[in-house]
Every structure is written in structure tokens, then in C-alpha cells.
Amino acid sequence: MADVLPPADAGSIDLVTLGATRTEGGTRSVSYRIGGWDTLPFLAAPPAGVRSPLVALEICDDPRIWPQVVMRELGDLSGDTAAWAREAEKRFSADLVRLVLTSTRDRAFSDFPAIGRTVEAVLSATGLPLIIEGSSEAERDREVFQKCGEAGAGERLLLGTAEADRYRSVAAAALAYGHSVIAQSPIDINLAKQLNILLREIGVPHDRIVIDPYTGALGYGFEYSYSVMERIRDSALKGDRDLAMPMISQAPDSLTVKEVREAPPEWQRDIAIRWEFGFALSAAVAGADIVSVRHPESVRLLKTAFRSLSPVTPGGGGAGGA
Amino acid sequence: MALKALDIYKMLPKKNCKECGYPTCLTFAMKLAAGKADADTCPYLDDATKQILRGATRPPIQLVKLGVGERSVPVGDEIVLFRHEKTFYHPPGILFSVSDLWEKERIVAAAERVMAEVFPRVGENLRFNGVAIRNESRNPEAFGKAVAAVEEVAEFPEVLISDSAEALASGLSFCGNYRPVIHAATLDNHEAVAPLAKRFGCPLVVRARDLGDLARLAKACTDLRVRDLILDPAPATLGEFLIRSTAIRKRAIDRSEPELGHPVYLDATACVPEEAAIVTGILKYAGVIVTSVLPPGTARMVLTLRQNIYTDPQKPIQMTPGLYRVGEPGPDSPVLATVNFSLTYFTLLGYLEASRIPCHLLIVDTEGFSVLTAVAAGKLSEKLIKESMERFQVAGQVKHRILIIPGYAAPLSGRIEEVTGWKVLVGPRDAADIGEFLEKEWVAKNQPAP
């Protein structure tokens, strides 16, 4: 009576491995396999060996543009990228650390060697697998991603982001040093597919791509992102191989939307966390295998929510007593 | 089993009399097939045919109205599993729950908040929909008092929660005429509870852990002539809710189990964390969500999410074209042009407000297309910019003649300069960079050197 699985001839999501332990050639204390699903999220137990969805906590190397509400929470920690990464694991219990190289967004940025040192410092501060968000300008990408890729060689990083008009540098770094790539497209299933094909054509295999369909914050276009994620997952389950990659979702504006900025001080923290939690949980329900957040409290709430959403019995359903 | 329009047409009188309100019998048949018309409006059908048509053409999920009057909430009547397949029509009613163990003041305070609290957002007034009263005292008289306390302030839907028919009857004596939802008829008590729903004409929640039992219970209550039913699959965890709610929606829509064609009920307070349950309920098919009295952060978040998810995905939300003032702009303030896709507008507006640089924002009518698609599709052109500038009298607002356009509209910059005679500055592609752009390209260049 409670069978909600798709028909047997349907497709499934590719497996992508993030992080490498010592036996796998890296130094991480854990590695994850994401993807593998042949159902919509939370309708069945995860495939064997898969942990999903995962929660990434974002940290950065230049906190000047980081949301105030997070800076207040972190206190001195935000000035020390390595310590921030360590606490992401130890105190905040994130599954992944996402290092955003905000230093590269500064117009005057030129210290490329510092990128390599930052990545190395973060890798030694935490045993968690790492996502690295590099520069956002084509002119800087080559050197930035090269430095990231090299510093994390063998660690199976997830490097971001490749976009339709600037994907070669990040793809080259991923291919040279054994990493995976975040493929970001602007809330459009066809553009997502097109970028995956472009990446495939320059040699990035399917199992090294994670789709980022771009996520608008709640109240700021989130509904478009939600439906694009559902469409991508639905198409993949119906057999479209070029969309059958795991997905990652982040809505970086969540903590700076008007609702948070203009909230009364005593409620600002609460509203900020809920705004982030709301998009991230919804994204996971729509099919995101990784959700990426900035507030430590969002991590805790999301992990509780995911536990609560996990099916009690594998493929479980309507039968059984209370 | 669903019938096709032509099958239905064969059963109709083919008189084209228009008495049903449709021009032809074929149109009527098509409306019936889509679940958008009622067989009863045809005066020439015999009862047996009506019976067949009602079964085959009623909406896959029944429409149930919670409460009466201005604040009544229609739920159900949905036709798809994913909003991108068409749209979701009726947002779930979200009701705060109170207990009959609480002091009267506390109950009244919760009810007053539901009455008064409004969050205006993108042209809509977002609010919570009602109050659910729990019979935690196990005492019918206390329950009646709690219901009466809510009734003093309430003009909104209520849910009466008790497994005791006696307590429910006590509550109904205060609010029975206002179509409160009765929760719940179970396998054990439905013979006592269903007649109450029938007597007062109230929607009735039926509750069972097994979907087969739930369908049988729904059938039993329908047979007792209770018209409006809501299904509570009694999940022990949030994961169970998601699985059962999805299964119910699928079976209702493909009509494989018509007895499950009713809205779904979710008690979010039974799940941890509660806000996860509310979010999941909004996304995955709940028609009625009972919550605790929510703190401000969760309250705003869930109402915003509900508005997002129940927005018609086939209609790009559009802003009214015009010249908008951000802050208190003067004759020396910058003029920025962008498209009327609401996501573009709100994102840009957010960053402009954060920059604290007052400006004039010209929104041109690209039919809701974003900058990128509007440029590609030719919706955004120099001609449209020129016409919009004239129509909204931009030149009269400022002393300078400089227009800032979105980064993705850069290919149009030369042509805009030609047709308008204004100097064009190409802004950033990403709205997030607009503050820095204005600082460098406008504020710094327009201030006298120190």
C-alpha cells in the first residue's frame, strides 16, 4: 500500500566520492560517497555506502564580506581560517568544510601563493573532506584553481565553480589533481544539462561532477530553484544521464536578506538561522545531496532534521504498529 | 477510473442547450474530464449517469473548506505531484495549537495573535490561519471552556482535537456552526465521532497508521454521509510522514485509491525539530498543518516558504514597470535600469538598499524575463529602454544624463547611447557587486576631491 518507488526501469544518480582517507591516497579522516539514489529523497534508505544528504559549513579566508550575523556568532574565530575549519568539525559537527576563497574577490588580489598555504592549513586543521570555492573571474581562475588543486592533490576535493563561460580552469585543475567539480548554471535545467555536456567533452567524467542549479534565498526566487532541482532529479530518475549527478545547494544571500537585516536585534539571529535552515531543508527534499550553510546553528538544526526524515525501515511504509 | 472527454461526451444529452454554463456539450465534457465542472449542473442527466460521472470526474483530491467567512481556508483540490507539472493551488492552512490545560489568558493571547498578525510580502498579506484546541485535560467541560475562550476572539478556522466524542460534542456546542475541523475519527471511535461531523456539517479528520485502514475509515465515514474528510496518516516520525503523504498524493492523483482523495493533515508538534516538519508539510502535500505558537523567525520563514511553493511556476512573477525610488534619491543620484522579473528586482533592490546609496531604479517591461534571457530573446532592447525612459519621465528626475545598465545587457550599450543620447555605464553582472560598483563609479567620481 505504501509503495512510492518509481518503476524498475528508471535511472539512478551517479556516485561521486568526496575526500580520500589514508588508504585511499589522501589524509582525510573520512570520505563520503554521495548520489546513487533511484528514488526521490527520503523515500527509501540511502544506497549502500552512501551518506546523504550532507551538511557543509562555509568558512572563508577574508571575512570582510561575510554576513555579520555569522561573524558575531564566531567572535575571534573568523580571523583564523584554520581554527574556523577545526571548529566546523569539532564544535559545529559539519559533515564537510566549504572554504570560500573570498580573498580572491578583492580587486587588488594578487597573492596567489597564499591560496596554496590557506588550503594546506585548512587541510591540516580538519580531517573532513573539503569543498573549495575559488575565484569568480576568468582571469584569476587558472592560477587560483591550479594552486587549490595542487595543495589538495590526492584529497579528492570538490572544486567550485564551473560556469558555462568559465569552466576550463577549474576542470583542468580537477583533472590534473584528481578532484571533482561543481557545475553551476543559472536556475535552468537545460543550461545545467548543457554545462554537464561541455564538461564531459573536455574529459571530466560523470562521477566527478556535482550540479549546482543556483539557489535563491527564501522569498527571493527560491521557488524557481526548488522546482529546477525537482525537475533535474525527476529527469535523472527517468533516465537522463546528463542530469544524473548529485546536486549541491547553497543560498548565500540567506543571511543578508531584508528580513534578516531589518529584524529587531533580539530576533535577528533566530530569523537568520531559520532563513538558512528553510532553504537548505527544502533543497534536500527537492534532491540536493549536499546543502551548504554559513551559520553553525543551521548545521545542528539540519542534521537533526535529516535524522528525523530518514526512513525508519529501509523502503519503509505504511505497515506496522505505533 | 478517470474518463476521457469523448467518453463523457457520449453520456451527455448533446443538446448544446448551454444550461450548464458552457457553450456546448463537448466543452462541458472537457471541463468534466479535467475535474473543473460538476455533473449536477446538467439538468438532463439521470441519476445513474450523474453517479458515474461524479465518481469519474470529481477532482482527484477533494476540496475542503476549513471554517467559514472571510478567513475560511480552502485546501485540497490539487492535481499534480510536482509544482512544475502545473502548479499547487491551495496553500495549507497553518494553525497554532493551544491546550485546554492552559490558563485562559494564554489561550486568548495565541488566538489574538492569529487574528492580528500580518506579514505583507510581494503584494500579499501572509498570515496564520487559525487555532487548534487540544483536549489534554481529558475533561469535556474544560475542553468546552477552552473552545469558548478561543471563540471570544476568533473569526478564523479551528481544529478540535480529542479522541473523545463527548469532549468534541462539548467543544462543538460553542463553535459547531463555524465549520471547525474535528480531529479525529479512528478505527475505535468513528461510529461515535462521525455522526458529530455529519450533524454539524464539519470537516472530519480520519486517523490511522496504515494507509489501507485509512482508506477503509474514509469510506466508512463517507458511507455515514460525512462530506468533507481530511486524512491523518498518524506518522511516528517525520520520515514516515513524507513517505505516507507522498503515497497518498500519488494514489489520489492516479486515482488508484480514490478513497485517499482527500487533503492530508500534519501535526508538526509531534516531530523534532518542529520547523522541519512544517517545511516538509508545506513542500510535500499537507493541507492542514498544526503547529505550536511559533517564534517570529520560524513564523516568517514558514509563511514565506508557503508563498514561494504555492506561486504559479508558469507565471514569471513580474514587477510593474516604472521608475522606483530607492532611499531618498535626488537630481544627482544615479539611474539604474533593469528588467521586471521580480527575482531580479528584489535581488537588486536588496543590494541597493544595503549599499545605502539612494538611486532611481527604472524597471522596464521584459514580460518577466531575466536580464540574460531578455537580452537573448530580444525582449530587452534600446527601443524599450528609450520608450520606458520617456514614459516614466526619467529625464525630469535628474540633472545628469547617465544610465547604468546590467552587466549582461552590455551588448546593448552602444545602441542605447545612440537612441537616447544618454551616456551608458555598464554595471556588474552580479547584483551582489552593485554596491562596490556605485561606490567606485559613482560616489567616488562625483565627489569633489578633498
Image (cartoon, coloured by chain):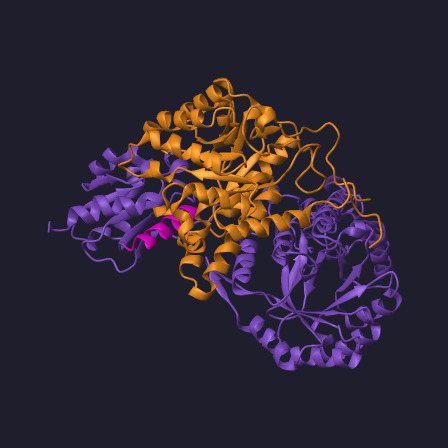
Q: Position of residue A33 (x, y in %)?
A: 62, 31
Tell me which corner region of the image, top left, top right, bottom left or bottom right, holds residue A44: top right
Task: In this rendered view, identify the residue nearer to me: B318 or B425.
Answer: B425
Tell me if B360 is positioned left or right of B229 in this view: left
Question: From this viewpoint, is residue B319 visible?
Answer: no
Task: In this rendered view, identify the residue nearer to me: A321 or B308.
Answer: A321
Chain A palette colour? orange
Q: Position of residue A32 (x, y in %)?
A: 61, 33
Tell me if B132 is positioned left or right of A283 in this view: right
Vertical position of residue A47 compared to residue B33: above or below: above
Tell me if B310 is positioned left or right of A2 in this view: left
Q: Position of residue B430 (x, y in %)?
A: 36, 40
Q: Quadrant of the N terminus of chain A?
A: top right
Residue interval drawn in magenta: B341-356
Question: From this viewpoint, is residue B114 visible?
Answer: yes
Q: Position of residue B191 (x, y in %)?
A: 89, 66
Chain B palette colour? purple
Q: Is residue B344 magenta?
A: yes
Tell me which corner region of the image, top left, top right, bottom left or bottom right, holds residue A120: top left
Vertical position of residue B244 compared to residue A209: above or below: below
What predominant SS class does the magenta segment belong to? helix
Vertical position of residue B303 compared to residue A181: above or below: below
Q: Quadrant of the C terminus of chain A?
A: bottom right
Task: In this rendered view, identify the residue nearer to me: A149 or B394.
Answer: A149
User: Residue at left 11%, top 51%?
Assistant: B448
